[in-house]
Amino acid sequence: MGSTRYIMSMGELTRKDNSLCFRKDGKNVYIPIENTKEIYCMNEVTVNTKLLDFLSQNHVIVHFSIIMKGTVVHFIRKISITAED
């Protein structure tokens, strides 16, 4: 079972090898993907599709909070279920 991570600062969240890297003001903070269940982005955070694919493969849920508009957006991996006869 992984941890819930909170990102309170503006910055960029990327994939670095097999972990996450949060860049802020030229400094990197590495977050192990194995210990992460979900991430709450409480400020402006830049992401890309490679990161979203990596998070999806590792079943990590990301919540983007847009405080000014009172909206919360969730990125959740779509799970396909097929029935075999």
Image (spheres, rainbow, N blue to C red):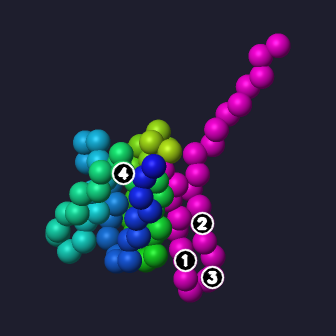
- Give the alpha-carbon distance from disc 3 to disc 2, as whole Å: 10 Å
- Give the alpha-carbon distance from disc 4 to disc 2, as whole Å: 22 Å
Point out the residue furthest to the right here.
85
Q: Amino acid at mark 1?
A: Ile
Q: Which residue: 20% across, 74% down?
A: 25
| Callout count | 4
The residue tagged with tag 4: helix, strand or loop? helix
Q: Is residue 25 left or right of residue 50?
A: left
Is disc 3 surrounded by few (<14), some (14 to 19) or many (20+) residues within 10 Å?
A: few
Find residue 8 and report its horizontal and vertical position in percent. 38, 77
Q: Quadrant of the C terminus?
A: top right
Compared with residue 25, is residue 82 higher up or lower down, i.e. above or below? above
Q: Which residue: 53% across, 74% down?
A: 65
The residue tagged with tag 1: helix, strand or loop? strand
Residue bearing the label numbered 4: 35
Q: Tags 4 and 2 in contact by the CB under 8 Å rule?
A: no
Q: Quadrant for residue 41, please give it.
A: bottom left
Residue bearing the label numbered 3: 70
Q: Which mark is residue 66?
A: 1
Mark closest to the chain's N terminus, 2 or 1: 1
Mark closest to the chain's N terminus, 4 or 1: 4
Point out the residue furthest to the bottom here.
68
Compared with residue 83, is residue 80 higher up or lower down, i.e. above or below? below
Q: Tags 3 and 2 in contact by the CB under 8 Å rule?
A: no
Find residue 4 and report its horizontal and vertical position in percent. 44, 62
Q: Amino acid at mark 2?
A: Val
Q: Is residue 73 left or right of residue 18?
A: right
Find residue 39 and report its horizontal and vertical position in percent. 45, 62
The residue tagged with tag 3: helix, strand or loop? loop
Residue 41 located within the stretch drawn in magenta: no
Residue bearing the label numbered 2: 73
